[in-house]
Amino acid sequence: MEKTYKSAPSKVDYPHLDDPYYSTQKHAPDVAMAEALTIEPRVFAAANRIVAACGQLTATVHKPFYSLVESVNAGAFLACLQVLESANVVEILREAGPDGLHVEEIASKAGGLHRKTEDGRPGPVSLDPAKLGRVLRLLATYHWLREVKPDVFANNRLSSFLDTGKSTKELLRSPEEKYDGTDGVAAYLATSGDEVFKVMSYLSDWLVDDGGANYASAFNLAFKTPLKYYDWLEEPGNKGRMRRFGHSMNGTRQWELAENVIHGFAWDELPQDAVVVDVGGGIGSVSVILAEAYPHLRFVVEDRAPVVAIAPQAWGSRHAELFQAGRVSFHGQDFFQPQGLFRVPGIGVVHEPTVYLLRAVAHNWPDEKVWEILLNLRRAAGPQTKLLIVDNLLPYACVDDESAGGENGRSGDAESDALGTVRSLVPDGSPLLPNLGRASANGYILDITMLGRFDAKERTFREMDVLARSAGWRIVRVKRAVGSLWAYIIAEPLGGA
Ligand SMILES: C[S@@+](CC[C@H](N)C(=O)[O-])C[C@H]1O[C@@H](n2cnc3c(N)ncnc32)[C@H](O)[C@@H]1O
């Protein structure tokens, strides 16, 4: 890590935790370079090992009861993050600058910005500064803010990551547009703090006590609804949630490096005007990245009709040229129904797309429903059509001795695991957990949120392999992302599905 930073043209250091980095702002070249290097594969891999080691050391030396208190009260921490976001504290502190702001002023500004309902106009409230101060102090204790002097708080590197880039004037004028045109990170936090948090608090009631007898998922129990999550999002009263969910999917692009999806498939080898169908593509979060990187390709984002209806507007002015040129277009399609024919601007009716892309979709559904989706795609596919599934592939928390794959996760090693299984993410003899512990926690956390929200799952390679085969697809290659458990799983049609 140090070597990479020292050998950079302007000898920069790893970004300091105290320094905010607002992605929507322009930065001096050395600041931008220091930030860019954090995701350089060798730096990223080294950072992961540091995280894994620190997580393991903390688990070893922290008094077990203290670890227990932190773990069982993780909800308190999330609740504080939720306050930070919903009270627009990050935006207020950005405008305050590096000296920060006294909590009385933060509370007064935040109260003035408050909106009554998720879709309503602003309704000022009187926010108690003493209570807000305690919330901000817990966040500062977990390094999500800085208390620069007693009761004065400023943004740091972590809190600045939550910034929407909106001015407080804009937030006051149109609170319902808070996430429009943003990177979706704040929306991801808001969705997690709302729906996911509520669902998670019912996981044990559902899994252990209900046992699935009365409710199909913890989500159904938490919200007392028989509807599936995506149907429920379309219910009256959930308009703001549905819009926010689309943005939050943009936020989840942070799970992967843009570079990973750009190089996760041989997009450059596809012919001019090849059509990629982004199945369950949401508002097109991944398609826009790929369309910017590969001007010769056409992307059709398929999703539920109400989602594609609001998709272009959600982007504000961003990527407008892609939508105008028809290089990214939207199409309503239920993936549980046979794929219909559709027209691509400038190309005409498409019979057999070149690629079906399925990113973060299979993990939303139990096996039998994923089988239906894959089968519909298989029936619509031509002999040359490829299927690209992008999801986490979870390793075990121990060495997998039956794996044909070798050690994966070393820098430059990402392509070695052609068979898809992983023996261990660390070299033999390493004291670290074979799945890199804390550094890989995101994948397992996502798995459990899929369990709670949908009774669905992230899968191991073997599970994905069996599922794909059962629907007429043969996995021919797996490329694992650098620095996370995301994988690019490429499949081809098996004969006679
Ligand atoms: C987890 S999101 C992933 C979105 C997108 N692929 C991405 O990576 O940003 C799953 C998507 O599946 C869509 N979806 C759910 N049920 C669907 C259905 N029956 N037909 C088509 N899309 C559906 C949702 O609306 C949502 O946009």
Image (cartoon, rainbow, N blue to C red):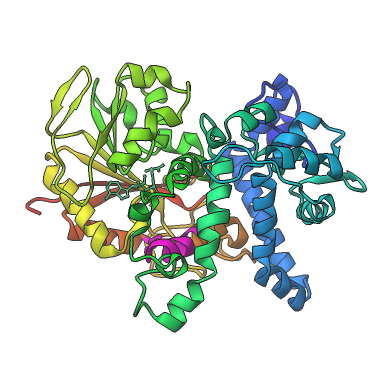
State the residue in front, 433 or 387.
Answer: 387
* Image: 338 above or below 444: above
322 relative position to 397: left or right: left
Q: Count how many numbered circles sit on residues in the image.
A: 0
- 280, 235: nearer the viewer: 235
Majority secondary structure of magenta residues: helix
Say whether residue 454 is magenta: yes
Residue drawn at x 64%, y 66% is 431
Q: Give coordinates of residue 437: x percent, y percent.
A: 59, 63
Range of residues picked out in magenta? 446-460
Residue drawn at x 68%, y 34% is 4
Q: Residue furthest right?
A: 150
Q: Is residue 3 above or below residue 422?
A: above
Left-right relation of 213 to 113: left
Tell me the quadrant of the picture where the N terminus can be found.
Answer: top right
Residue 371: x and y in percent read 22, 58
For the point 85% across and 43% down, the residue is 104
Residue at the outermost bottom position: 209
Residue at the left extreme, as displayed:
496
